[in-house]
């Protein structure tokens, strides 16, 4: 049995991992794989976003290995945001106060968090390491903005996954090479903002209108609508209407 967080020695105890993937076969494969890795222990499994958030709050793993597409309910992005926002457990803070450690107590002392934002014994919010097949700019940006510590693709070698989990537990970021390339490309050549006409079309898109209905509403041709949609997709880094609306809401481009 894994000892309570307050009794664990970070130098000699395994990284405690919670798996979140909506495919049972994938979870089983990850469990078998991680069981072979020294210094890593899987303490729980979740099949959807809500379950992942609940287990993360109850078990307080060091790392949550998170898929992005989780079927019904909240997706991996929203689950990541909620997990990253989990508060430090007050009961453990009080125990450390009584032990005289440097945590934020009633007298206002410093909370002793490290550079990763975790408490002295790792009781802050778990770190989320995304493990997915999706590598679009939109997915990467949304995950990072939601608070993900790292972003890996499922095509990575096992050794890379093990290393990323250990890095995430220490609060260090890890990106798959293709993901890092896309992030750097965005920084070097940021996409131009949407024009007023593109914002108009995006607003109509959010209402669920078809290309023909958008054309009628804005007094333009369907061909023009298609041209603008292509530019919107490119600028937002998506390839579907639903993706465009989702990213637009994330970036607060829609009222």
Image (tube, grey):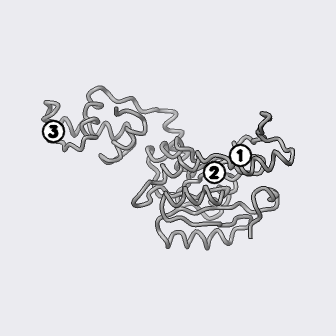
Density class for disc 3 (Cα within 10 Å; few <14, some 14-19, many ≥20) is some
Density class for disc 1 (Cα within 10 Å; few <14, some 14-19, many ≥20) is many
Label 3 SS: helix
Mark 1 touches mark 2? (CB < 8 Å): yes
Label 3 – label 2 distance at C-alpha: 46 Å
Residue drawn at (42%, 33%) of the image: 191
Residue drawn at (43%, 44%) of the image: 138
Q: Nearer the viewer, residue 182 or 246?
A: 246
Mark 3 and mark 2 lie on one chain; the one further toward the N terminus is 2
Horizontally, residue 166 falls left or right of residue 143, namely: right
Q: Position of residue 118 (x, y in %)?
A: 71, 46
Which residue in the structure is indicated by mark 3? Answer: 222
Label 1 – label 2 distance at C-alpha: 9 Å
For the N terminus, the image quarter is bottom right
Horizontally, residue 46 falls left or right of residue 101, namely: left
Label 1 SS: loop
Q: Position of residue 148 (x, y in %)?
A: 57, 47
Q: Position of residue 130 (x, y in %)?
A: 55, 54
Mark 1 and mark 2 lie on one chain; the one further toward the N terminus is 1
Of the numbered discs in the image, which one, if any, rests on residue 246?
none
Mark 1 touches mark 3? (CB < 8 Å): no
Which residue in the structure is indicated by mark 1? Answer: 118
Residue drawn at (65%, 66%) of the image: 43
Q: Residue 31's image quarter?
A: bottom right
146 shown above or below 66: above
Which residue in the structure is indicated by mark 2? Answer: 127
């Amino acid at each position: 049995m894994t000892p309570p967080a307050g009794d664990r020695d970070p130098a000699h105890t395994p990284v405690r991992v919670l798996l979140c993937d909506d495919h049972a076969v994938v979870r089983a494969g990850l469990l078998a794989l991680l069981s072979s890795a020294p210094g890593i222990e899987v303490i729980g499994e979740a099949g959807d976003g809500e379950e992942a958030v609940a287990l993360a709050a109850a078990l307080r793993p060091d790392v949550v290995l998170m898929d992005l597409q989780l079927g019904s309910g909240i997706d991996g992005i929203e689950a990541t945001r909620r997990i990253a926002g989990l508060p430090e457990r007050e009961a453990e803070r009080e125990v450390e106060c009584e032990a005289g450690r440097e945590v934020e107590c009633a007298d206002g002392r410093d909370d002793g968090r490290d550079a990763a934002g975790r408490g002295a014994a790792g009781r802050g919010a778990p770190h989320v390491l995304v493990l997915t097949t999706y590598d679009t700019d939109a997915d990467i940006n949304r995950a990072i903005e939601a608070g993900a510590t790292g972003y890996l693709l499922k095509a990575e070698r096992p050794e890379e996954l093990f290393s990323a989990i250990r890095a995430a537990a220490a609060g260090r970021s890890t990106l798959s090479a293709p993901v890092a390339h896309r992030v750097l490309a965005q920084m070097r050549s940021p996409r131009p903002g949407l024009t007023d006409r593109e914002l108009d079309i995006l607003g109509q898109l959010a209402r669920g209108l078809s290309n023909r209905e958008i054309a009628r509403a804005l007094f333009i041709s369907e061909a023009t609508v298609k041209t603008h949609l292509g530019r919107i997709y490119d600028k937002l880094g998506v390839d579907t209407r639903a993706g465009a609306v989702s990213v637009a809401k994330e970036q607060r481009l829609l009222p």
